[in-house]
Image (spheres, rainbow, N blue to C red):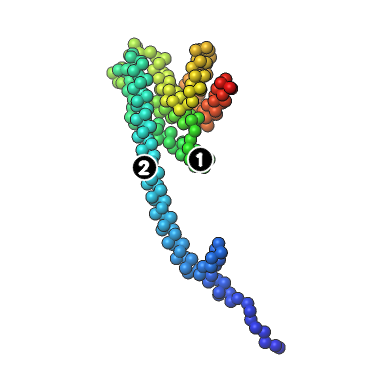
């Protein structure tokens, strides 16, 4: 039998190296590199988490300050309630944090870096209406002189005021004109009624305001 030159690659050589993206790696070096990268990625994630927490903390503080100012303006127009109610800081904090939780979940799901006015409006209304941060002072609770209807809807009305602040002026004008013309059957009053007696998801409210903008564009077009 004739002798043949063995040109095959040794199995040990194959198991000791690996090609990744065109680069040859010795297995032992690759394992060391993976451990190094795991440490670097963990550190990077910790830094990102700290930055995200800091970002949300600052956003929450800014939004709370904005809502407080809106409350001051809102309650100044209602002298019969000015001394009877207050803005509960804990409930407001829950509402604002929940707002940003929803916004960030939406961004993560859609891969978006920002939330448009429909989403800002929808989630603001949803969470203020849910947590009801405007509360009656104990000494005024059950006082007959207070307007029961206003007390029933005060948080819902405030939620709409805060939410509408994100909308385009043409949409606000449409809502205002419709309210003057149609009263109880207006979009505003129907939305207020539904917020009082029905549960709205953020997505449902987003759809409502998207449809409203289309209507406003048609009217102005």
> Residue 79, labelled with which disc?
none
The image shows residue 26 at horizontal and vertical percentages of 50, 70
Q: Residue furthest bottom?
A: 1
Q: Quadrant of residue 56?
A: top left
Q: Which residue is at 53% across, 68% downward?
A: 24
Q: Which residue is mark 1?
A: 112
**Quarter that holds the C terminus:** top right
Q: Picture coordinates of residue 152 (x, y %)? A: 41, 18
- Crowding at label 1, few (<14), some or many (≥20) Cα neighbours within 10 Å? few
Residue 181 vertical position relative to residue 102 in the rendered view, above or below: above
Relative vertical location of residue 118 with respect to residue 174 in this rendering, above or below: below
Q: Residue at x 41, y 58 (%)?
A: 39
Instruction: Tell which circle, 1 or 2, labels the residue nearer the N-terminal end.
Output: 2
Q: Residue at x 35, y 21 (%)?
A: 73
Instruction: Identify the residue shown where x is 52% and y is 19%.
Output: 174
Q: Secondary structure at mark 2?
A: helix
Residue contact at pointers 1 and 2, CB within 8 angstroms: no
Inspect this view and state whether residue 65 appears.
yes
Above or below for 1 versus 211: below
Q: Is residue 104 left or right of residue 61?
A: right
Residue 51, position in %: x, y?
38, 45
* Pick the front one: 162 or 195: 162
Q: Which of these two is toward me, 136 or 206?
A: 206
**Pointer 2 local density, CA inside 10 Å: few below 14, some 14–19, many at least 20:** few
Element under label 1? loop
Q: Position of residue 89 (x, y in %)?
A: 33, 29
Q: Residue furthest left?
A: 139
Task: Quarter of the image for the N terminus: give it.
Answer: bottom right
Identify the disc placed on residue 54: 2
From mark 1 to mark 2, how far is it between C-alphas? 20 Å
């Amino acid at each position: 039998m004739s002798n043949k030159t063995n040109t095959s690659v040794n199995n040990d050589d194959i198991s000791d190296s690996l090609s990744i993206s065109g680069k040859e790696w010795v297995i032992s070096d690759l394992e060391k590199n993976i451990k190094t990268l795991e440490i670097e990625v963990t550190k990077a994630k910790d830094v990102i988490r700290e930055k995200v927490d800091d970002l949300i903390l600052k956003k929450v503080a800014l939004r709370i300050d904005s809502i407080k100012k809106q409350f001051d303006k809102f309650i100044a127009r209602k002298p019969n309630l000015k001394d009877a109610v207050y803005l509960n800081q804990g409930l407001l904090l829950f509402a604002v944090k929940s707002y940003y939780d929803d916004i960030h979940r939406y961004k993560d799901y859609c891969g978006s870096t920002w939330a448009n006015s429909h989403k800002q409006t929808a989630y603001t209304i949803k969470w203020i209406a849910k947590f009801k941060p405007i509360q009656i002072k104990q000494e005024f609770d059950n006082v007959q002189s207070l307007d029961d209807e206003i007390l029933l809807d005060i948080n819902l009305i405030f939620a709409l005021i805060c939410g509408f602040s994100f909308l385009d002026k043409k949409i606000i004008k449409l809502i205002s004109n419709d309210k003057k013309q149609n009263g109880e059957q207006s979009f505003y009053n129907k939305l207020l009624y539904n917020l009082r007696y029905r549960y709205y998801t953020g997505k449902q409210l987003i759809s409502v305001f998207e449809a409203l903008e289309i209507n406003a564009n048609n009217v102005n077009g």
